[in-house]
Image (cartoon, helix red, strand yellow):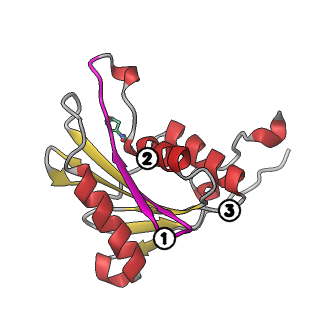
Amino acid sequence: MKTNEIRIFVDEYEGLDELSEMDQQLILEARKIARTAYAPYSHFRVGASVLLTNGQVISGNNQENSAYPSGLCAERVAMFYANANYPNEKIAAIAISALKNGDMVDDPVRPCGSCRQALLEAEVRFKQPIRIILDGKNKIQVLQGIESLLPLSFSRSFL
Ligand code: THU
């Protein structure tokens, strides 16, 4: 038996002004769209903004449902809209922001497992890593690809 170590790399920024102009813009879009999420059950409003390689930004937010599993997370709303309308545009980055009872979350928001899997699918589909920007009041974390959020993943190569 041997134990392997899997390392991930997370860049941390103390505030918006430490990031590039483009990343700042993407985060601001995610913060803005989080406010109009439909989250009457959890009161946890999430915004996700996707940057396509043509420079276009597509944003989405979580859409809840009284039958809970019928709702969808912000990340997938944004990504699926982008993929549906711009099927040939690669996704370069995604910024995710969240409000808990109206206040921005202290620690960077964490995408759920299903959204991580959907991000992986987009990376595999477009053969390009997606920069993932996780917004929070205390710090902003940036990952250079889904590998850092979903190690030991399942993808089409296993089929
Ligand atoms: N949610 C997202 O939209 N994205 C995340 O990254 C975490 C969770 C939503 C799903 C649900 O509407 C609410 O937040 C509480 O789980």
* Residue 33 percent location from the top left of the image: 26, 53
Give the label, 3 or 1, closer to the camera: 1
Question: Does dot 3 land on a helix, a strand or a loop?
Answer: loop
Question: Does dot 2 land on a helix, a strand or a loop?
Answer: helix
Q: Which residue occupies the extreme left position in the image?
A: 102
Say if residue 149 shows up in the picture. yes
Q: Say what amino acid the circle numbered 3 marks.
A: Gln
The reply to whether dot 3 and dot 1 touch (C-beta < 8 Å) is: no
Q: Say what amino acid the circle numbered 2 marks.
A: Glu
Q: Residue at x 83, y 33 (%)?
A: 159
The reply to whether dot 2 and dot 3 touch (C-beta < 8 Å) is: no
Q: Is residue 56 magenta?
A: yes
Say if residue 15 shows up in the picture. no
**Structural crowding at the residue carrying mark 1, measured as other residues with C-alpha within 10 Å and reported as few (<14), some (14–19) or many (≥20):** few
Q: Residue at x 60, y 55 (%)?
A: 146
* Residue 137 percent location from the top left of the image: 25, 64
Q: Is mark 1 within 8 Å of ligand 1?
A: no
Q: Is residue 159 magenta?
A: no
Give whichever of discs 2 and 1 has the lower sequence position: 1
Foreground of the two, 76 or 110: 76
Q: Residue at x 35, y 58 (%)?
A: 108
Q: Which residue is mark 3?
A: 128
Q: Say what amino acid the circle numbered 1 marks.
A: Gly
> What's the distance in space between the residues labelled 3 and 1, CA to CA?
15 Å
> What's the distance in space between the residues labelled 2 and 1, CA to CA?
18 Å
Tag on residue 75? 2
**Magenta residues, as a range?**
50-66
Q: Which residue is mark 1?
A: 55
